[in-house]
């Protein structure tokens, strides 16, 4: 429990918690750290901060201090690729990416955790790309002292499906691109897809292993895809041929190539006609024409997740809907905007 | 004990329907029994070791009773009319007692645990199956000082009410200056204005009823 003592009697005692000072526009931070031994010179400063009494901690065996609590919580949350230091500041511990990759947040566990009165955790969005050292979450216990059992339950809630937070590295894929369309194949239109996709892949640490052009012919599309697989591509992308036009046979070609799982349509705009398929274990992303005209589409939301090892299904494409609407800002700031952040 | 899905199916059949309260009740009972160290409370050697206090008369109470095998008539099921979704599991031979409380947070989290389902009860049932115990429940270790008169077993006390003459069992009488009173006389009851009545066919007895009479038997007039 906490005991209050008058400031006049505080000289020689050790502070139970950080004491924050706010000087508007100038400084906000701890004026005194937890554990600091109060000396005569501090008394005036503490009075200026409005302190007439101080807390002294007298912990019962079943109680826990906020700093120990924060450490237990951080330990329960930090999964692979997430690091933290047992150096709470004002009772709060920050969790950081221990490597480059894609942040994964167990959002159900996070909500369950935050419904416990005595604790909180705030994170950046699930599926955010992060770099090593970047802040991904912070957690703290709210009371200065609380029952240990409460924190142990909160920690259990945080790790109910494994740790609440992890950073999955993106694998370096060898991508095969199959550009479909009579107009490009016959040279009526110059292809612009390959350089766009190559740039996106490169930014994620992957590379284009091969890019081929085929007409709107399902058998030839299938043959091209199989050929890419034979050459060792471990990621496939097709472009165009995804709409309702009778000449658009890319989906048929993907099926002929042996797709065992195929989900057409994503709840994102741009990207409604995005396709996700698997030929065996090799993921295939069907990029609709919007990929030519927009900086960010469903592809940009899904590709990093695929590279992070996630198996994308119907549910994942449906869940893009909340936050899946690009606002077409005059100056695009993606990924620093809301697009795709609700999934 | 049977697996969860078997217990749930049995409990729902006994209760009359499968509902979110059944899921919570079955899980509450499983957790409560685990906490006090009983792995099959319906087995003869365990059945006398358990007393359960339910704090609500809702679907959950039926599920708790079904899984644990406690019965009101065996005095192993106690009803504390608190309107709280909680039950306390007391092990008589060790005194261990844990109060398992269904969290309100669990209700708010159904959307997250069963996001694909739009029908409320269906979503709650699915979510309550998926949530870990830590989300679904809070647990308190409690002490229960059980009066010997509240234990299972033969009636230990019988006292007649000095006002109405009704026999009161198990020490449930009220002490008053005029002597022991039954609770209806001493502190009021859930009913009002009791008056003796006569009813049709007052001398009926089961042994003497023919099959034809039984089939013609009508419910008494309201």
Image: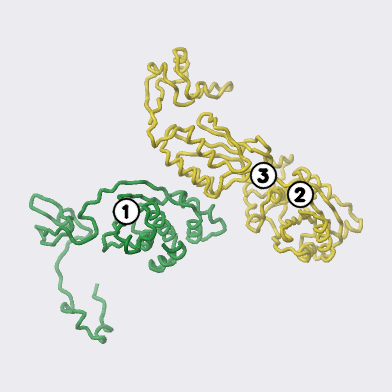
Chain colours: A yellow, B green
Q: Helix, strand, or loop for circle 1?
A: strand
Q: Nearer the viewer, mark 2 or mark 1?
A: 1
Rendered location of residue A123, percent (x, y) = 58, 40
Q: Helix, strand, or loop for circle 3?
A: strand
Q: Earlier in the sequence, mark 3 or mark 2?
A: 3
- Residue A173 tag number: 2
Crowding at label 2, few (<14), some or many (≥20) Cα neighbours within 10 Å?
many
Rendered location of residue B179, percent (x, y) = 9, 53
What residue is shown with label 3? Answer: A102
Rendered location of residue A212, percent (x, y) = 86, 55
Chain where mark 1 sits: B
Please say if A281 is above or below A134.
Answer: below
Answer whether labels 3 and 2 touch (C-beta < 8 Å): no
Chain where mark 3 sits: A
Q: Seen from this angle, which residue lies furthest left?
A: B178
Q: Helix, strand, or loop for circle 2?
A: loop
- Residue B131 tag number: none
Please say if A132 is above or below A55.
Answer: below
Q: Seen from this angle, which residue lies furthest right?
A: A187
Crowding at label 3, few (<14), some or many (≥20) Cα neighbours within 10 Å?
many
Q: Marks 3 and 2, how far apart in space?
A: 15 Å
- Residue B91 tag number: 1
Going by the image, does A292 lie left or right of A107?
right
Please say if A49 is above or below A270.
Answer: above
């Amino acid at each position: 429990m906490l005991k209050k003592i008058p400031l006049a009697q505080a000289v020689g005692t050790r502070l139970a918690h950080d004491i924050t000072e706010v000087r508007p526009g100038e400084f906000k931070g701890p004026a005194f750290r937890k554990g600091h031994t109060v000396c005569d010179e501090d008394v005036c400063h503490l009075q200026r901060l409005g302190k007439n009494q101080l807390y002294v901690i007298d912990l019962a065996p079943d109680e826990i201090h906020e700093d120990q609590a924060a450490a237990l919580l951080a330990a329960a949350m930090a999964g692979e690729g997430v690091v933290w230091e047992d150096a709470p500041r004002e009772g709060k511990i920050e969790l950081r990416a221990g490597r480059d990759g894609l942040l994964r947040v167990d959002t159900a566990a996070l909500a369950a955790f935050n419904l416990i009165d005595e604790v909180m955790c705030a994170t950046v969005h699930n599926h955010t790309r992060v770099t090593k050292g970047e802040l991904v979450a912070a957690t703290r216990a709210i009371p200065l002292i609380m029952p240990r059992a409460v924190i142990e339950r909160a920690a259990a809630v945080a790790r109910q499906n494994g740790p609440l937070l992890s950073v999955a590295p993106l694998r370096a894929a060898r991508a095969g691109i199959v550009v479909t369309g009579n107009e490009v194949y016959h040279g009526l239109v110059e292809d612009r897809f390959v350089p766009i996709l190559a740039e996106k892949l490169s930014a994620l640490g992957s590379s284009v292993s091969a890019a081929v052009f085929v007409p709107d012919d399902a058998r030839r599309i299938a043959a091209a895809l199989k050929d890419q697989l034979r050459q060792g591509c471990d990621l496939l992308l097709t472009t165009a041929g995804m709409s309702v036009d009778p000449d658009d046979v890319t989906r048929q070609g993907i099926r002929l190539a042996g797709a065992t799982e195929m989900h057409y349509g994503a709840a994102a705009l741009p990207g409604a006609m995005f396709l996700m398929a698997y030929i065996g274990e090799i993921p295939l992303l069907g990029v609709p024409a919007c990929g030519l005209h927009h900086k960010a589409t469903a592809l940009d939301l899904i590709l990093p997740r695929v590279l992070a090892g996630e198996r994308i299904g119907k549910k994942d494409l449906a869940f893009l809907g909340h936050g899946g609407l690009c606002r077409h800002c005059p100056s695009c700031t993606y990924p620093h905007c809301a697009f795709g952040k609700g999934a | 004990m049977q697996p969860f899905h078997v217990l749930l199916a049995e409990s729902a059949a006994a209760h009359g329907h499968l509902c979110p309260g059944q899921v919570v009740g079955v899980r509450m009972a499983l957790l409560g029994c685990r906490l006090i160290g009983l792995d099959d409370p319906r087995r003869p050697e365990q059945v006398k070791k358990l007393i359960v206090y339910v704090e609500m008369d809702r679907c959950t109470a039926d599920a708790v009773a079904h899984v644990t095998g406690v019965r009101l008539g065996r005095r192993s099921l106690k009803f504390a009319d608190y309107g709280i979704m909680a039950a306390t599991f007391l092990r008589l031979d060790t005194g261990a007692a844990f109060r398992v409380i269904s969290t309100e947070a669990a209700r708010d989290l159904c959307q997250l645990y069963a996001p694909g389902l739009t029908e409320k009860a269906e979503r709650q049932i699915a979510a309550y199956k998926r949530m870990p115990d830590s989300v679904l429940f809070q647990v308190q270790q409690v002490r229960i000082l059980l009066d010997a008169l509240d234990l299972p077993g033969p009636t230990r006390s019988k006292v007649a009410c000095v006002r109405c003459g009704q026999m009161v069992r198990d020490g449930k009488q009220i002490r008053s200056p005029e002597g022991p009173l039954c609770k209806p006389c001493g502190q009021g009851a859930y009913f009002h204005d009791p008056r003796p009545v006569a009813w049709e066919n007052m001398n009926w007895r089961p042994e003497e009823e023919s099959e034809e009479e039984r089939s013609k038997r009508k419910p008494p007039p309201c």
